[in-house]
Each structure stands twice: as structure tokens, then as C-alpha cells.
Image (tube, helix red, strand yellow):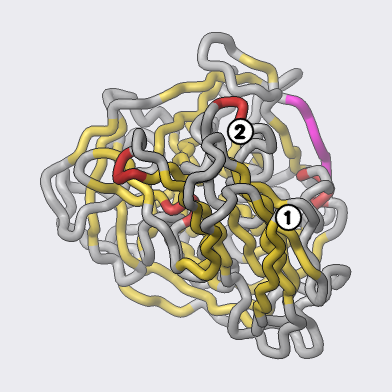
Amino acid sequence: MRFLIIVLLLAAGLNGQSAACIQFGKFASTGAVSSTLVPAGTLHEISGLEASRINPGVLWAHDDGGKINQVIAIAKTGKVVQQYQVGSIVNGDWEDIAIGPGPEKGRDYIYLADIGNNNLKYSAFSLIRFPEPITPPTPGALIVIKNIEIFAFKYPKQTHDAETLLIDPVDGRPYILTKESKPSTTAYLYGYPMPLDGRNIKTMKLERTFTHAAPRFSGGDVSSDGRWVVVRNKDVVYTYLRGVPTSGFAAAFVNLVCLFDGSGQGNAEAITISPNGTRLYCASEAIKSPIYESIGTLPVGTKAMPAWWNFGSPAKSWLWDSPGLSLDTFPALGRKVSVTLWSARPGAKAALGFDSKAVPDGVIRFAGGWAHVVPAIVVLTTTSTTGTAELLLGVPTSVNLLGAKLHAQAAIEDIAASYGLALTRGLTLQIGR
């Protein structure tokens, strides 16, 4: 087995034990949504907003209940990138949108939450899921999304109104945070009993009841590494720390960490975290709604920390005649982490690459299908396709790389595969806080 040492200096800052949150600044408008979308009235009542993970600079938006059944890709300037119709599904009362994992590992999925219930007259609700689309270079004709899944659910004892959908990126489990009537001082967090089931109406599980924050939550999001949760009401943005990946999702709501001013945005319901976790974006229910941005900074004296790796290949992927890539040790700053490569075809040439800019899993849209791209190659093994690469994670001194990601992927010579290469799934390390 060949051992390789690569020194990686990550210029970011956060102590893994610190509960200090990023200090988000005052929200400022970056533009306004066009009022000329087709049909007329589209995005006049933005209820959900979600930052794309695979389309840089894109925000996914949708209208409140009773409006058009579309999700629309927009830029933070409000410019329309592309309109998508969600099959023939009716927008009953769509209240939030989120991105999370799904059945195909390494691929992001959009989740829509039909969970509004203003008059408490509904007892059954649903989540809608489909793969996140790759947006075109320029806007085109309306695109109809066809590969849609629907997951129906109900609450265990009483019905609720809700406007917040949260997806745990660690295990893909959806959570609903309720929006109670004004006299109430309590809010409820419900978790969907996994696995997701498109055939039966499942009963949600109550995960937490809490009263330390105003209960009329109107939207929320989870950081892409799963460590932080932000939720909002009309005037305040609340942040909660989930911590290490072994912590249960509901544990994030034990203590309120920080809160920020979200007032002056009208009837604001939508909020999302940028993929690197350093910016918040919001929108409100209004014609030509502004897009609001808040830029975060680390508190003085805190440092960055590695979050966790994901999208790895199964440890025994060779059993399925495919190459595999896995992480052998949990990452920590100042320590070595080991990445191991396997191949089903001994003797074939292999390349193990690390890159800070590659797409996770090396997956891009190509010629109407999915193709893989090898990231910048820094290690080349010519005698064996089984080996371990060790990365020494340096201790950061700057906050500039907060949210930065490092990707590892291996390509193995295989004449039977497309382009003569078989690729592992990628491994992704994100610098968290």
C-alpha cells in the first residue's frame, strides 16, 4: 500500500468547541424581483427561498399558496434565471423550500413543503421532491419538471399551521417547525419518520417543544454542513448550533445562540443560507420584492474548523465491481486524515485528485446526461490502484476560507467505461464554524 503526504494549509478560523456564531450584519437590498414574470402575479408573494448548491449565485423561489405551481431560479439581483413548472401539482399552500440529499447519493434534491394551514382546516400535508435542475446559461421557455415524488404526512394529535421546512443534510430527514397562533407562546418541531414513503400517510414525530423564542416562525434553513440552523419570524432571525454530526438534529434547539435584526422587510417569510454559510438571503411577500442580503463575519478570537466529509463510496464498493474512496479518520485541524482508494481492476492506472474548486463528486451536466470530470490531479499511482493518501490539515490563521470545500476524487483506467475511466464518488470536506 502506498502512502502519500500532502500538506494543505486552510486559511480559515473556528474552534470546534466554540458556540460563537457568525455575526450577521444589517440586511441590505441587492435588487428586486421582476414584476413581468409569466403568468402575471408570479413571485408577488414569495414564501420560500433556497440557495442553490450546484448553480452558483442562484436562489430558488416560489409563491405562497393558491399561486402558480412554479419554482423559479433567480439571481440575488432579482434577475430571472429560469422558470420551472412542478409537473401538474397544485400549489395548495406551499410555504417553504429546502435542498437536501435524496435517493441518488451525491445529488442534491429540492423539497417543497405544502404545509400552510391558516384556518387549521387541513389534517394532511405533503412534501414534494425532485432533483435540483441545472439552470441554462440564458432563460428559455418554461421547463416542466416531471420526475416528482410526493410524501404525505399528518401530525400525531392536533393539526398545525407551519411555514418552515428544515432538511438535515446528514441523513436527509425532513423537519417541520410550526407557526402557532398569536396567543401561543410555544412552537413545535416535528420530524418525518424515515424512510420517506410515497405510498402511505405517515405520522410525524414530535422532536422538541420550546418557548425561548417567539413561536411565529415563518421560514428557516440549515447550513450545507448541517451544523447551523437559522429560522425567522417577521422581525427577528434566530440562529441555533447543532454541533458535531453525531448530535441529533433536535439538539440544535436546546439553546438559542444568537439573534439578528430582520425587521423592515415587510411580510418576510423566506430565508436561506449561502452554500458556504457566510451569507443570509431573505425576501418578502410583495410585488417586486427586494432580495435582502446579510454578510457574516466571525467573532474576534474564533477559528475555523473542519466539518465532515460526505459523498464517499461504500467501503466495500469493490464487491460491485466499482472503485471506492473513503475517509479513514475524522478530520481535525492540525492532524492528518487518511483517504483510501480501492479498485475492482488490479493493475489499472489510477489518479487520486484533490481540488478546492471541483464540483462535489465531480458530477456535471454533459450532453443530456451525467458525466464526471477529474479534478486537479496531485497524486498519480501507476503500480497499484489501492493506496492511502494522507492530508495534513494546517491550523488556519485567517477567516477568508470559512465555508471553503476541498474535494477528493479518484479516476481509474477502465477500457469498459465511458472515456476509458471509472470514477469513485467524491469526498467533500467543508470548513465550518
Q: Are marks 1 and 2 in contact (CB under 8 Å)?
A: no
Identify the residue under disc 1.
214
As rendered, which of 371 and 161 lies closer to the eye?
Answer: 371
As rendered, which of 60 and 339 lies closer to the eye?
Answer: 339
Of marks 1 and 2, which one's residue comes earlier in the chain?
1
Q: Is residue 373 left or right of residue 300?
A: left
* Main SS class of the magenta portion in the image: strand
Residue plotted at (83% across, 55% down) = 212
Indicate whether residue 345 is drawn in magenta: no
Q: What number is the disc on residue 317?
A: 2
Alpha-carbon span between mark 1 and mark 2: 48 Å
Whether residue 267 is situated above or below residue 150 in the rendered picture: below
As rendered, which of 369 and 289 lies closer to the eye?
Answer: 369
Q: Is residue 59 left or right of residue 276?
A: left
Q: Secondary structure at mark 2?
A: helix
In the image, the segment drawn in magenta is 205-210
Which quarter of the image is occupied by the C terminus?
bottom right
Which image quadrant is residue 80 in?
bottom left
Residue plotted at (61% across, 33% down) = 317
Question: For the residue carrying disc 1, how many other residues have a C-alpha within 10 Å: few (<14), some (14-19), or many (20+)?
Answer: some
Q: Secondary structure at mark 1?
A: loop
Q: Amino acid at mark 1?
A: Ala
Q: Amino acid at mark 2?
A: Ser
- Mark nearest the camera among 1 and 2 is 2
Q: Seen from this angle, which residue lies furthest top? A: 200
Question: Does residue 97 appear in this view?
Answer: no
Q: Seen from this angle, which residue lies furthest left? A: 141
Which image quadrant is residue 335 in?
bottom right
Q: Position of residue 383 (x, y in %)?
A: 56, 54
Whether residue 334 is situated above or below residue 234 in the rendered picture: below
Residue plotted at (16% across, 59% down) = 138
